Image (tube, rainbow, N blue to C red):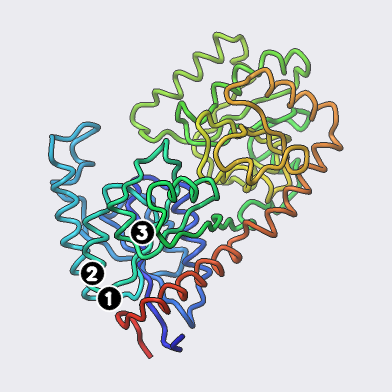
């Protein structure tokens, strides 16, 4: 490989701040600046974009303000064709940015089947293109046309890689688990202080269901498990932590509140909303619940909980079994089985030594496989493999 420094342009198009964006920030922060210089390309300014500044990467916008033709201006259902217009105009703006920055690599942070125009523009300029697939096939359409316009494909887990290979078996595909900055989830204080910061009593047994408030995330399963749990241990409190994709509606929050009242456990359920101090929440928590009803492409919550040495009860779907080993680093339950969730919680209530052991062993596994430094090293090795294969000069500098 040449000793020249290569510029990597990361394209992120998410309208919300989630695991993909947090992983991108960690990756850009951990890049070896003697080898790669990161630039993050965003469509137009949004509130969550301020977090990207912490990565130390340059941030560029295709459009400096929310344009009139953007789908965001048209509500939930924009006029027919507005999405095609937006993609066309943003692709034109991307062409200008690519010509100016001349990156060696374009890394599409969150694969979408609508990315064809962006990838086509990048390839026409001779740039190495990477698509990062962060969804299961049941959650996002896998387009062979888009995948074929990628020089390399990164999948967040082995199950995602197997699904991509079914669509595009000849692609250069790698499974690279997301990196998590464990320091962010280690609370610098005592459990009592963490509970106090959340206005929780010291004698409560805390369950936390952590995920965006979306029906498929399984918060309702946690609520349905609570009557049996409360009967066994009346000091239990369920915290539901996560914001709604559309905060102007609050539809899922209302549904879950009504479900809690209907099941007679409204007083035992607390809605935290978006949590800005996850380290305090995980430290205050006794057991973390990750009960997705359709599986996760990676399963970030079990990894975050392990950073705080907290045991996890999770649905055994998607990539979660790659992260949570039964009775070693957590407990797996069947999809939407509230009875099994209740039994697992009561077991850990009665066996605190088991909960401690599961949390400790999960932390050891995460330190070895899922930390952000390991992730960055593997991604950079893939960059160099692709650059060596294609030997494309754009973006190099001395």
> Does the CB distance between marks 2 and 3 fall below 8 Å?
no
Q: Which residue is mark 2?
A: 97
Q: Position of residue 103 (x, y in %)?
A: 32, 74
Say which element carries label 1.
helix
Q: Nearer the viewer, mark 2 or mark 3?
A: 3
Q: Is residue 124 above or below residue 241?
A: below
Q: Is residue 319 above or below residue 185?
A: above
> The C terminus lies in which quarter of the figure?
bottom left
Q: Position of residue 29 (x, y in %)?
A: 50, 67
Q: Distance of mark 2 from mark 1, alpha carbons?
A: 6 Å
Whether residue 146 sits left or right of residue 376 in the image: it is left
**Within 10 Å of the Cα at label 2, are there few (<14), some (14-19), or many (20+) other Cα atoms?**
some
Q: Which residue is mark 1?
A: 101
Tell me, for residue 108, which label it has, or none.
3
* Residue 150 image-quadrant placement: bottom left
> Does the CB distance between marks 2 and 1 fall below 8 Å?
yes
Q: Is residue 146 above or below residue 140?
A: below
Q: Is residue 7 above or below residue 120?
A: below
Say which element carries label 3.
strand
**Within 10 Å of the Cα at label 3, are there few (<14), some (14-19), or many (20+) other Cα atoms?**
many
Q: Nearer the viewer, mark 1 or mark 3?
A: 3
Please tell me which residue is depicted at 42% across the width and 83% down the height of the picture.
Answer: 5
Q: Position of residue 256 (x, y in %)?
A: 50, 20
* Residue 36 image-quadrant placement: bottom left
Please tell me which residue is depicted at 68% across the width and 51% down the height of the picture.
Answer: 307
Q: How many numbered circles does the render carry?
A: 3
């Amino acid at each position: 490989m040449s000793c020249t420094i290569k510029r990597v342009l990361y394209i992120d198009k998410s309208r919300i701040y989630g695991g993909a964006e947090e992983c991108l920030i960690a990756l850009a922060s951990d890049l070896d600046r003697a080898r790669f210089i990161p630039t993050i390309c965003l469509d137009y300014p949004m509130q969550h974009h301020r977090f990207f500044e912490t990565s130390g990467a340059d941030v560029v916008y295709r459009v400096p303000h929310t344009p009139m033709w953007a789908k965001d201006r048209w509500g939930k259902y924009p006029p027919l064709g507005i999405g095609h217009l937006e993609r066309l105009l943003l692709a034109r703006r991307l062409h200008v940015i690519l010509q100016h920055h001349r990156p060696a690599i374009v890394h599409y942070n969150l694969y979408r089947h609508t990315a064809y125009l962006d990838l086509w523009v990048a390839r026409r300029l001779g740039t190495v293109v990477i698509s990062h697939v962060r969804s299961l096939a049941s959650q996002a359409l896998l387009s062979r046309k888009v995948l074929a316009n990628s020089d390399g494909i990164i999948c967040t887990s082995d199950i995602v890689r197997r699904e991509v290979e079914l669509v595009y078996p000849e692609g250069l595909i790698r499974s690279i688990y997301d990196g998590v900055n464990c320091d962010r989830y280690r609370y610098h204080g005592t459990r009592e202080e963490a509970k106090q910061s959340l206005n929780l009593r010291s004698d409560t047994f805390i369950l936390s269901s952590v995920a965006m408030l979306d029906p498929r995330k399984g918060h309702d399963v946690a609520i349905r498990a609570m009557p049996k749990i409360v009967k066994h241990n009346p000091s239990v409190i369920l915290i539901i932590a996560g914001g709604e994709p559309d905060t102007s509606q609050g539809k899922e929050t209302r549904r879950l509140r009504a479900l809690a009242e209907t099941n007679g456990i409204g007083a035992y359920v607390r809605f935290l909303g978006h949590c800005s101090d996850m380290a305090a929440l995980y430290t205050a928590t006794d057991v973390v619940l990750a009960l997705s009803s359709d599986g996760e492409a990676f399963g970030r919550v079990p990894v975050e909980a392990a950073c705080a040495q907290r045991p996890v009860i999770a649905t055994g779907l998607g990539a979660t079994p790659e992260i949570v080993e039964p009775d070693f680093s957590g407990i797996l339950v069947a999809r939407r089985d509230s009875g099994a969730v209740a039994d697992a919680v009561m077991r850990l209530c009665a066996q605190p030594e088991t909960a401690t052991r599961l949390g400790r062993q999960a932390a050891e596994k995460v330190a070895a496989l899922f930390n952000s430094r390991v992730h960055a090293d593997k991604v950079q090795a893939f960059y160099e493999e692709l650059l060596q294969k294609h030997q494309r000069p754009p973006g190099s500098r001395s």
